[in-house]
Image (cartoon, rainbow, N blue to C red):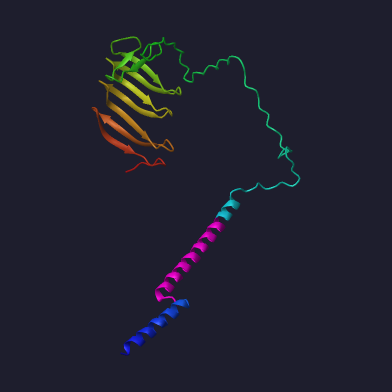
Amino acid sequence: MTTTPVLSLGAMLCLSIGLMGCKSPFSAVVEAQVEITEVAGKKKAAKKAVTDKAKAKRSYVSPPLIAGYKEGDPLFPGLVPPVVDSLPTGKPGALPPVPNPAGLPVLEQKPGVPVPLTAPDSVTTNPTDGLSYKAGDLEPYSGSAVFTHANGQRKFEGFFKNGLRNGPCMAWYANGTKQYEGKFQGGQLIEGYVYWYYADSLALKLRGDYKKGRMVRGTHWDRQGALYR
């Protein structure tokens, strides 16, 4: 039969090709991938080496040199060091007394006394009940009294009965302008006048007229003193 020589010829051809170093297509692809991987690895290693070298160079920066400077020389030879005064020694002296601007008598308070000091024979208003008392008395005050502001300007002049304003009374603001005037009864203005002023010029702005404990009329002026109609 003719099939045997053909097979033998094919076997011999394959054997000869294998001895000559013939490689299959699959083996060629594998070798190409290996070569690409090796090249990429070499490039990555080279890049890392350059980066490490750059970091090593930036790790230390030498200070700038000054022309003519030697180790141990002062940097600023013309600078005069400041003179520092020595701290005082010994016990500090007492502070000078603070003057009393109101001209009131200086009172001495014993330690542990919670009651605020009041000048002798003065009349003050108790914020708890709203009544006025004379210093040292437990009963509400009845009689005449004069109050002053902290700057010495007169604040009030009038009469009290059982701790309330009763009778003719007059009051002023700290700047000297009049606040009210009239007749009081039981702490209320029964008949008289109350005044208001412009804050910038202190010119009279409004006057309220009181009758039987109520304001019955108001008169208004402008800043130039003209009466409003």
The image position of residue 209, as x and y in percent, is 29, 32
- The residue under the point 29% across, 19% down is 167
The answer to which of 48 and 157 lies nearer the viewer is: 48
Please identify the dominant SS of the magenta region. helix
Where, by quadrant of the figure, is residue 34 drawn?
bottom left
Q: Which residues are magenta?
A: 22-51
Q: Is residue 35 magenta?
A: yes
Q: How many marks?
A: 0
Q: Is residue 155 magenta?
A: no
The image position of residue 106, as x and y in percent, is 46, 13
- The residue under the point 34% across, 36% down is 206
Drawn side of residue 24 relative to residue 62, left or right = left
Q: Is residue 51 above or below residue 12?
A: above
- The residue under the point 31% across, 18% down is 126
Drawn side of residue 58 relative to residue 116, left or right = right
Q: Is residue 23 above or below residue 203?
A: below
* Residue found at the far bottom of this picture: 2
The image position of residue 5, as x and y in percent, is 36, 87
- In which quadrant is the N terminus drawn? bottom left
